[in-house]
């Protein structure tokens, strides 16, 4: 069909939601062309997911990272938290370059209501 194929028991609605991370608008840190390319990519993903039948929304990086206690921390901290929250995915989060996967999993956890204080901020203050 035109919607994403999802297996579910008969007569049970499936809530398909997707969040696309919207880049922060920071005109002083990148060129207008780079900003336009990033926003275009967000729009493409938003459109594709919407057409596939997902309830789609954008989320600001500072919003979900703030709720998960990752605001101001680095990509390794995101990988560490993802491995802690979703231990079944540890094998695909071992390399430094797996930070994108980790953050996608963390956005999914955030979308399902996961929040926590920033336990790692005290670690940064001591360095």
Image (cartoon, grey):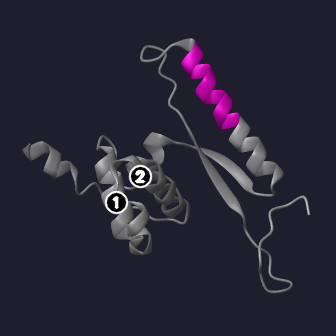
- Callout 2: few (<14), some (14-19), or many (20+) C-alpha neighbours within 10 Å? some
Farthest residue toward the left? 126
Query: Under tag 1, what secondary structure?
Result: loop
Instruction: Give the spatial CA distance, label 1 vs label 2.
Output: 7 Å
Report the residue at 47% width, 21% height from top.
26
* Of the pair 114 and 88, the residue shown nearer to us: 88
Q: Is residue 95 above or below residue 41?
A: below
Q: In the shown orientation, is residue 114 left or right of residue 72? A: right
Question: Can you identify the residue that label 1 sits on?
Answer: 94
Residue 55 visible from this viewpoint: yes
The answer to which of 94 and 127 lies nearer the viewer is 94
The N terminus sits in image quarter? bottom right
**Magenta residues, as a range?**
33-43
In the rendered image, residue 90, in percent from the top left (x then y), is placed at 38, 68
| Residue under the point 68% across and 28% down | 40
Side of 50 where 114 appears, left or right: left
Provide residue 121's location: percent of width, then percent of height. 21, 49
Residue position for label 2: 98
Residue 24 in the image: state x and y as whole percent: 50, 30
């Amino acid at each position: 069909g035109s919607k994403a194929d999802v297996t579910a028991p008969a007569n049970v609605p499936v809530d398909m939601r997707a969040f696309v991370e919207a880049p922060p608008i920071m005109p002083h840190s990148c060129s207008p062309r780079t900003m336009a390319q990033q926003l275009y990519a967000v729009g493409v993903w938003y459109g594709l997911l919407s057409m596939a039948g997902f309830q789609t929304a954008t989320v600001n990086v500072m919003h979900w990272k703030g709720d998960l206690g990752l605001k101001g921390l680095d990509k390794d901290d995101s990988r560490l938290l993802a491995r802690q929250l979703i231990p079944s995915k540890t094998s695909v989060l071992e390399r430094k370059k797996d930070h994108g996967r980790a953050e996608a999993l963390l956005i999914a956890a955030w979308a399902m209501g996961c929040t926590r204080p920033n336990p790692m901020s005290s670690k940064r203050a001591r360095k």
